[in-house]
Each structure stands twice: as structure tokens, then as C-alpha cells.
Amino acid sequence: MFAVEFDDSLSVEALLRAAVVFKFSKGSEADIYVGSPRYAAALRAMLEAVVAGRMAASDPESAEGWRKAYRLSAHRERWQMVAAYVQRHPDWGFMSEEEAAGWVSVVASPYWLSESETRRMAGLGEAS
């Protein structure tokens, strides 16, 4: 495991925002990262660090604001991009529910979806 330390939370927040803008830029350079599980995990880790940092600083409202900011359903254009990209996987039509949900999570990261949104995105209908 590697650890990177930053002097302040604003640096992590800036890096997270830049990484997200890059991932969702629709540029050819970013395309390989959109479906990268490692990049997805790194983005999730940065978001979790920002939220945890805000909580540690006794600022739960800001922590919740960051969490809400990364709800995919609040970003229509990015929702549409994720929905189109997930279908590009060569095994998309043959994935199990668990595999499809995992793939959606990778492509959407660091944005998050509810279980029913993930099922809808994966074409599985509503969760029971």
C-alpha cells in the first residue's frame, strides 16, 4: 500500500475535482480511464478522504455536501455518459447482475448510485 500526504484538504479536493473533470471530459486521452477499476478506486478513495477529513474537522454539513455533490443522478449529462459507456463493454449483455452493477460502479466512480439506480442503469429494472 502507498500513502500520499497533503498539506491541506484543499489540495486533495482540487486533485479530486481535476481527476473527475479529466475522466468525464469525453476526450480520447481519458477514455481508457473511464473503465479503469484502479482509477475508479483511486477516485473513490480521494472522495472518501475528503468526506472523512470534513468529518474529522467537525464539519458534517460540508462532508454531506461533498457526498451529495457526487450523486450521479444529480448530473444528467454524466448519467447519460455512464449509461452509454457501460454498454460498450464487450460482455455487457452477458454479465450477471453483480458483474453489471460492479461495472456501472467503476464507470460512474466517484459518483454513486442507489441500488435501484444501479439496477436501472444496468437494465435490470427496479430493485425489489
Image (cartoon, helix red, strand yellow):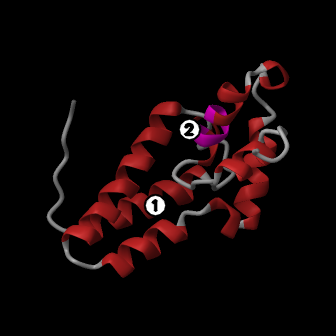
Whether residue 91 is visible to the viewer of this picture, yes or no, is: yes
Location of residue 47 with respect to 62 vertically, above or below: above
Judged from the image, the secondary structure of the residue bearing numbered disc 2 is helix
Q: Give whichever of 11, 80 is nearer the camera.
A: 80
Find out whether residue 103 is within the magenta segment: yes
Magenta part of the protein: which range?
102-106
Q: Residue at x 73, y 22 (%)?
A: 96
**Viewer-proximal residue among 111 and 36:** 111
Q: Residues within 10 Å of mark 1 (few under 14, many from 20)?
A: few
Residue at the spot x=44%, y=39% of the render?
41
Q: Which mark is on residue 2?
A: none
Does 24 sit above or below residue 11? above
Quadrant of the frame with the C terminus: top right
Image height of 108 relative to 71, above or below:
above
Given the image, on which type of amino acid does mark 2 rest?
Tyr
Q: Is residue 29 visible?
A: no
The residue pinned by badge 2 equals 33
Residue 51 point in image, percent of width and height? 34, 64
Say whether disc 2 or disc 1 marks the residue closer to the N-terminus: 1
Task: Residue 100 in the image: state x and y as whole percent.
Answer: 71, 31
Q: Is residue 18 left or right of residue 50?
A: right
Q: Secondary structure at mark 1?
A: helix
Q: Residue at x 85, y 24 (%)?
A: 93
Q: Residue at x 75, y 37 (%)?
A: 86
Which residue is labeled 1 in the image? 18
> Residue 4: x percent and y percent?
19, 46
* Quadrant in the picture for residue 7: bottom left
Residue 41 vertical position relative to residue 74 in the rendered view, above or below = above
* Type of amino acid at the residue the image marks with label 1: Ala
